[in-house]
Every structure is written in structure tokens, then in C-alpha cells.
Image: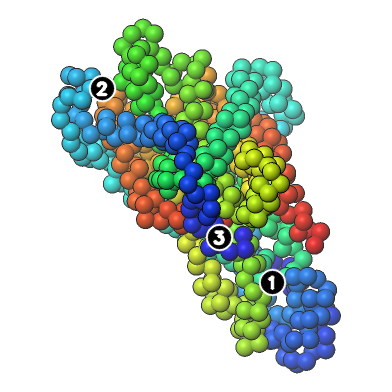
Amino acid sequence: MSTTAEKPASPNSGPPTSGVRTGTAHAPSANAGRKRKKSGRVRRLSRRDKIVLGIMVGLPTLIQLLFVWLPTLASIALSFTRWNGLDVTDIKSAGTENYEFISQNYPPFWPAMQHNVLWLAFLALIATPLGLLLAVLLDQKIRGSKIYQSIFFTPVMLSLALIGIIWQLFYNRDSGLLNFLLGTAGTPQAVDWFGDSNVNIWAAMIAATWRHAGYVMILYLAGLKGVDPALREAASIDGANAVQTFFRVVFPAMRPVNIVIVVITIIESLRAFDIVYVINRGTNGLELLSALVIQNLIGEGQVIGVGSALAVVLLVISLVPIVFYLIRTFGKEKEA
Amino acid sequence: MSTIARTLPVQTGRTGKTGKRHYGTHIFLIVMAAIWLIPLLWSLYTALRPKEDTDKYGYFSFGGSFGFENFVQAWNQGGFSKYFLNSILITVPTVLLTLLFASMMAFAVSRVSWKFNITLLIMFTAGNLLPPQVLAAPLFEMFKHVSLPYSVSDSGNLLNTYIAVIIVDTAFQIGFCTFVLSNYMKALPQDLTEAALVDGAGIWRQYWNIIMPLCRPALAALGTLQVIFIYNDFFWPLLFIQSGDRLPITTAINNLQGQFLSNYNLIAAGAMITLIPTMIIYLVLQRQFVAGLTLGASKG
């Protein structure tokens, strides 16, 4: 790692005015560096500095490679194998068998795909716009705005697991408040909102919305603060009404936040695991890709190859928003 | 992301536009706020009532007494003290390690110019966005096949230890924190470290004595955010820790439902107890938390 750290010491750092290789950057050499690269400065690093820098970069990078990227690659590799997880020598090549199995002979797979898409659509079309609406309303000069913000924001602090339990108490067939409010409590028509496989995905998505909308709201409130007030004034001088001003001027001006929100919405819908796992471990109407991965890894019937194939499907889908986000975020910097 | 001050206070509106009455808006907001509070208040209400009263009058009633007996019973019967301790044992080291590693990395990529800094930053940011389930199987097997002496781990490997959870949580969170901190550090004037260089300060002193103190607002915001994130983490302990009594609280509440059978009063009390630390942080450090959330988002 220390070899990479030597790179910043650029070769043309001018005459060795300092004589010793202590990192004293003199004005001329610093200027030369600015000319070469916008943000970079030429500087001589002492051997000790290089070692320190090597450790500062090397340690986090090693952790990141070892515990995030190596396992990701290993998931891909394991998805083409058959393995019971016992001995490393038991790993047998399986070709694309696991993928054929999940797509053809694994009944929960397609429902899980559908549920993931549904979850994304629900967050994107209902939860996120709701959060945006709340942000826009609360960004006005309105009495009690802080209190409203605190209320909508509270669920963002809670874990999805806890949210599952709190909503379970609300949705319960016999003791939950919802059936009481609907007037069906204690009657045969009472719905078990988390138990009935026809409705539980909707009930779970509403519980997830409870958290997601507050998250989106807080991000957009910050985004709205960042919009130059002169833009709004210009728009109103031009005769635009509030709605036009928002959609034609303010919303496009929040582009950086919009990108983050798009990515968060997609990622959250792929990560929706905790809540369905708390409800019923992701079965009976609540199948999700992430839950299926875990069902194949935990418990007696360990099928690591199948679990990994499911994980790779999840990975491929999540790479779409990840790459989109990275291009948007780092694209400019790379050009610069 | 130029200043933290801009994103810190999420306050109401701009000047101007006064005198308008927002009746419709208020009605909408009041209805939404009520919907938002109902699940929480319902849990609290159920938790405060003894089971005998809810059995006698039904859950939808106002009769009977109110008190904290369920909280006491849930605390003792559920073993909350042990779960909270486990949460602390996982959260504190994870947050400290995450901030340490992320700040070192952020310093290197933002204050020293070298060939791979953008590449590394991309790798770190992307890693944080992956669904954790993608890495689950290999990590589980990796930890299972690392042999440890039985004096260190009773499983003989890294499974069922806090170390496993701490390492993976740290690895996962470093990406986000590095991204945020590197943006923050980039915004600090270059002259700061140049002056230090002239004085002969080495890399470590530039990092620890000059840049880090200036990053305090960002570190406080990220620290608060990370405490909540790690405290709320459900998945990694679920995967790595098999003994029920070693679980942190967020993962353990999943088992309480079975433990308390269908005593909803106790379940509700347990849920409310779990909520207390979060609420304390919320009340004391809300600004920090919000700043942490928006720090990552305000730079596109």
C-alpha cells in the first residue's frame, strides 16, 4: 500500500530547494503543482509521512476489500457451485444450475421479484412524493412547522424491526386499533393485516412509508433551503404561479437532492428486509429477494449455492442505481 | 456541502409571504400528524395498561388503571439490561472505529493528491450502497472457518462473537462516512495544511491536530447518525450471533414476541423500552442527526 502512497510526490517538483526530504512545500513548487492539476499540489513527502499515509489509506482499504468486496465476489463465485457450507473441499461446480433452479423450480422467486418491484413502485409513487409534499408544505412560513417536522421525523429514528412490532400492535386482528376503527374487530370480517397473504404486503409497505416519507421530507427540507430565493422571485415576477414555480424552477434546482432521493428510494426498496423478517420471516405473501437469500442461508436446509444465486440477482439489480449514482456524483470530478 | 451551517438547522420558511392563512394546509398537516402518531400512541397506551384490565374491558376502552408495571415486568422478564449492554458493546466500538478509519481515509483522499484517490472513494461509496444480504453467505462462511481458541470464542470461530458484528458494521459504514468527511475536508482551505507543512508538520499532525479539530461539527453529526444506525442494525447480529442472550436489543425484540406469547401489553412495553434510547438521542441531538442525514445528500 505504501507504494501507491508514493504517487503524490510528483517528479517535477522543481529544484530540490529544501535539500532535505522533509515535506516542506515551498511556494514555487506549490504553484507548479497548481498548474499541473487543479486540486493537486506537488509536495515532497518524507519517508515517515509516506508510511503514515500508507497506513491511513491501507487499513480502511483493507477492511473494505476484505469485508465488502471480497464477499461480494465470493457470492458471485458461490452462485455457480453446490455447497453445504461444511468443508471448503466440498464445493462442487454447478454451472448455471442454481439460476435455472430459482427461475424455474423455486416457487417464491417470481413472487419475490414482483414484491420487490411493487415495493419500489409504492415507495417511488406514494412514500417519496408524500415526503416531498410534506417538505414543501413545511418549508412555508407556517405556524408549528417545527412540531410537524418532529412528528413526521420520529419514525426515521426507529429501526425497521421495531416499526414492524409497533405496526403489528396496530394491525392485530383482535387487539389492534385498526380493526376497531374499521368496526370489524371481533367479527368474522376482521382482517389479520400482517397475516393475510392478500393484504400483508400492502400493510407492510404502509408501515415502511411511515418511515420513508419522513426521511424524504427531511432531505427535501434541506434541499429547499439550498434553492436560491432569487430564482423564486424571478419566477413570480415572470408571472408563474406557485405550482409552476415549484415544478419548473424549484424542483429542477434541487437536482443533487433529487438524485440522492432516487437512489435512496431504490436502495431502500431492495433492502426492505428487517420489517418482513420481523413479521413472518418473509413468507406467506411477504416474499422479498433479500428474505429469500437469508432463508437459504440460515436454518437447517442450508443451500448456499441457491442463496448466492439469489444474492447475485439482488446485486445485479442494485448495481443499476449504484452505478447511476456514482456516475452522477463522480463523473464531473473525473473530468476535472 | 460547502458549509455544515447551511444544512444544520432545518427551520421554517424564508422571510416574506407573510399574512397568508394556511387553513387547508393546516388541516392536511394535522390529519397527517395524527396518522403519524397513532401507531406510537397506541403502543404506549397498550403498554401502560395492565393485562387484566385489557382482558376485562377490551383493548379499545378507557376503563381500568394505568401504570408502568408492564415496563418493569417486560424489563425483568425480557432481560433488557443484558440486551442493552450488548447493544452498547457493539455500538460504541463500531462508531469509534468507523469515524477513525473514515476520517483517515477521507484525509488521504481529500488533502493529499494522488493517483487513486477518486477510484478508492468510488469503491468506498459503492460498498456502502450494496444490500447487506449480498455479502451474507461468504461473510458467514468466512467467519465460520476462522479458527479461534475456545478461550476467546466459545464457538471456536468468529461466529457468535461481537467482533464479527463490529468488523462488518464498520466495514459497511466506512464508505458513507468517508464520502461525507472527504467532502467536508475538501471544503477546508488548503492554506491550513500548507502553513503546517512549512512549519514541518508531518502527515499525522496535519490530520490529527489541524484537520480533525476542524471537522468536529461533521464528526458530531456523523457520530450521532452512526450511533442510531448501529443501534438500529437488525441484520448483522441476526446473521452472526446465534446465542439469544448475546443479541443486541434491536435484534432481540424479534424474539420477545415469542417470549411474551400474545401478551400484547408486554410486547408494547418492550417496544417502548427499546424506543427510549432513540428518543433520548432524538431529543438531545436531533440537530446533529438531521445534519448527519443531510450532509451526505446535499452534495450531488
1 vs 3, front mark: 3
Quadrant containing the N terminus of chain A is: bottom right
Asked if residue B225 is positioned above or below residue B68 in the image, the reply reads: below
User: Is B79 above or below relative to A231?
Assistant: above
Of marks 1 and 2, which one's residue comes earlier in the chain? 2
Instruction: Label 1: state its secondary structure.
Output: loop
Q: Chain of mark 3?
A: B
Left or right of A298? Residue A103 is right
Whether residue B149 can be seen here: no
The percent position of residue A79, horizontal first and vertical second, equals: 68, 33
Task: Please state which of residues B159 and A322 is positioned toward the viewer in this rendering.
Answer: A322
Which amino acid, mark 1?
Answer: Val
Q: Which mark is residue B112?
A: 1
* Crowd tier of the residue under label 1, counting other residues whose Cα lies within 10 Å: few below 14, some 14–19, many 20 or above: many
Identify the residue at image location x=57%, y=46%: A220
Tell me, what colour scheme is on the image? rainbow
| Residue B124 on image: x %, y % | 65, 54
Residue at 51%, 58% in the rendered image: B8
- Nearest to N terminus: mark 1 or mark 3: 3
Q: Which residue is mark 2?
A: B59
- To the question of a shared chain for discs 2 and 3, the answer is yes
Closest to the observer, A272 or B214:
B214
Specify the amino acid type for callout 3: Arg
Q: Residues within 10 Å of mark 3 (few under 14, many from 20)?
A: some
Q: Residue at x 66, y 17 (%)?
A: A105
Residue A185 visible (yes or no):
yes
Q: Nearer the viewer, residue A312 or B137?
A: A312
Tell me how far mark 1 sits from mark 2, CA to CA: 63 Å
Q: Which residue is mark 3?
A: B6
